[in-house]
Image: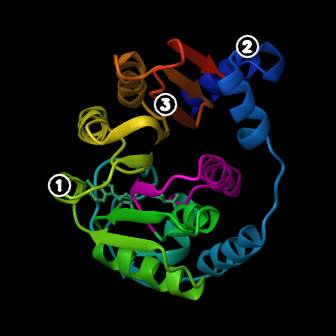
Amino acid sequence: MSQLSILFKYFNYFVSAKTKHDIHSPFVFQLLTKAIKQKTSATAFTEIEALRNSLLKNKSMITIEDFGAGSRTNNGNSRQICEIAKNQAKSPKYAQLLYRLVEYFQPENVLELGTSLGISTAYMAKAAPNAKITTIEGSESIASMAVENFKSLNIQNISIIKGNFDVQLPLMLENSDPLDFVFFDGNHRKTPTLSYFKSCLKHKNNNSVFVFDDIHWSAEMEEAWEIIKQSPEVSVSVDLFFIGLVFFRKESTKEHFIIRF
Ligand SMILES: C[S@@+](CC[C@H](N)C(=O)[O-])C[C@H]1O[C@@H](n2cnc3c(N)ncnc32)[C@H](O)[C@@H]1O
């Protein structure tokens, strides 16, 4: 999908998306007012953004393995750290949204597919210091940098698994507690996304939250998002354009929300 068609889609989303005044579901209204639209600021934001700024200035080159879809900018296998920080890490707006979601739901067991340098992981870990955060990253050198970043932020509740999701996810799930919160942020293609979703679905509970990045990034991702929303297990979905949330609450009637963020 070209940048122009994404811009066009975003414009359509922005003019047609609902605001809190149009939401009648108490669950979604609370989510919107207490988490999504909250203007909280935390010490963690300053610490993690300082780390991001130092990564954005880091011109060192590392050799990476290219995994799946996820970058429109460079397909070589040598990258500057600053490029990775610029192109892969969630922006402060979305990383801080993840923080607020994790803070609001207080999950015990969090899984992230796609660590990169660990910016989004750090936000989630700081939002729930007692939670167990597991994150999977296929590129060995990037994962090693993420480990250093977690140390520099003094974060102790993250376990990083290095390896391909296709191999590591089933292994990790074999011994996993129920997944309370999952952030899908790697290999943005239809078939792998649906496959990771199906694997995680077996480990959801009634209150699990699954967050998908880049749901309108490509035609394939839009197809995957439609299939995910329509899955019988999903009751509520929330489309914030760059990120989509799904919920499995049996007490909620099936409804799909497109909300301005
Ligand atoms: C968009 S980045 C993650 C950004 C990170 N969540 C953040 O916001 O700070 C996606 C990462 O997923 C990794 N990845 C993509 N496909 C993968 C796969 N099949 N197995 C393992 N890692 C993969 C890439 O190496 C990349 O580092």
Q: Residue at x 16, y 58 (%)?
A: 171
Figure quadrant of residue 46 = bottom right
Which residue carries the number 1 mark? 174
Residue in view at x 38 percent, y 63 percent: 135
Nearest-to-viewer mark from 3 and 1: 1
| Secondary structure at numbered mark 2 | loop
* Pointer 3 residue: 246
Image quadrant occupied by the C terminus = top right
Vertical comparison of 208 with 155: above or below: above
Q: Nearer the viewer, residue 21 or 242?
A: 21
Q: Secondary structure at mark 3?
A: strand
Magenta segment range?
88-116
Whether residue 38 is visible, yes or no, is yes
Disc 2 residue type (three-letter): His
Disc 2 vs disc 1: Cβ atoms closer than 8 Å?
A: no
Give how far across and how far down residue 31 sits, in percent: 69, 34
Label 1 packing within 10 angstroms: few (<14), some (14-19), many (20+): few
Q: Which residue is mark 2?
A: 24
Q: Residue 96: horizontal and vertical position, in percent?
A: 68, 55
